[in-house]
Amino acid sequence: MKAVRALFMYAALLTIPASSFAEDKLPFNLVTREQWGAQWVNPNSYTSAGTIVKFTLHHTAMAYPANLEAAKTEMRKIQKEVMTWGTDTAYHYIISPQGDVFQGIPDDKLGTHALNDNYGNIGICFMGNYMNDTPTRESQEAFVNLVKYLKDKYPGIAQSAKRQGDPDPKRRAFILHRETYATLCPGDKLVALQGELFARIFSDPKSEPLVYRDYTAAATGGEAYMPDVQLSSPW
C-alpha cells in the first residue's frame, strides 16, 4: 500500500504546472520535460558534468517559434534529431522567443553541446537563427534570470566570471560557442549582446574588466568560421 501511495505522489509531481515552479521557486518560466512532451530518457544514461564553472551560449539555427505550442513542437524535433547522435536534447536549457525556458538535460549532467568542453559547462540555447532573427526582450530577460539562478546554485560560475577577460575562452564564465569551435553559433545578433548580458548577470563580479572581442562574422570577414553545423551533426 505504501508503495502504491508513493507511486501516486511521484506521478502527481510530474504533472505540476511550470507556473508553479516559476512562482514558488524560479525567477523564470520553466517548461518541464513533461509539459513539452519529451521522450523518456533513462536517468542512468546521464553522466555527471563535474563541478559546474561556466556556461556556453548557442542558437539552434532552426525555427523561430511564434508561440508556446510551436516551441514545444520545436523541442520535440530537437530532441528527436539530437538522440540520433548525442545525449537527449544536447543542451541543458533552451529559450524560446516568448521567454519560456525549456528543460533539457539536468544541469548537473554532461551535455553534448561544446566539442571537448562539456565538463563543468551548462549549454544554454536560443531557439532561432540569430544571424538573421532578433533576440526578443523576453528571451533576454529569461536568459539573464536563468543564469543568475545558476550562478547562485553553482558558485564556480561566479568564480569564473572573475576571469572573463582571460585569453583562453574555456577559462571564462560566459562563453560564446564560436569562441571554442569554428561556427557562426550563436549568431551575430546574440554575440553583440554579450557584454550587456554579462553586465546584467554579474553586476559586480570583482573581476578583471570584461574584454569584449568582436566575434561577429562581419569583423572577421567570415574567414574564422564555418557555416553553422545543423543539429544532424553533434557539433
Image (cartoon, rainbow, N blue to C red):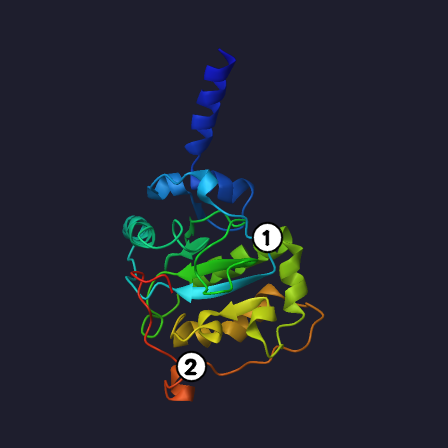
Q: Give the residue at mark 1.
A: 50
In this rendering, does residue 166 appear at all?
yes
Label 2 vs label 1, nearer the camera: 1
Return the residue found at the far top: 1
Q: Nearer the viewer, residue 208 or 78?
A: 78
Q: Give the residue at mark 2.
A: 216
Image quadrant containing the C terminus: bottom left
Mark number, residue 104: none
- Indicate the secondary structure of the residue bearing disc 1: loop
For the point 66% across and 56% down, the residue is 155
Question: Is 51 situated above or below 195?
Answer: above
For the point 48% across and 23% down, the residue is 9
Horizontal and vertical percent for residue 222?
36, 85
Whether label 2 touches label 1, CB < 8 Å: no
Return the residue found at the far right: 206
For the point 37% across and 89% down, the residue is 221
Amino acid, disc 1: Gly
Horizontal and vertical percent for residue 141?
48, 60
Horizontal and vertical percent for residue 203?
64, 67
The numbered mark, 2 or 1, whose residue comes first in the sequence reads: 1
- Residue 165: quadrant of the picture: bottom right
Q: Nearer the viewer, residue 26 or 180?
A: 180
Amino acid, disc 2: Thr
For the point 32% across and 62% down, the residue is 233
Horizontal and vertical percent for residue 134?
36, 70
- Indicate the secondary structure of the residue bearing disc 2: loop
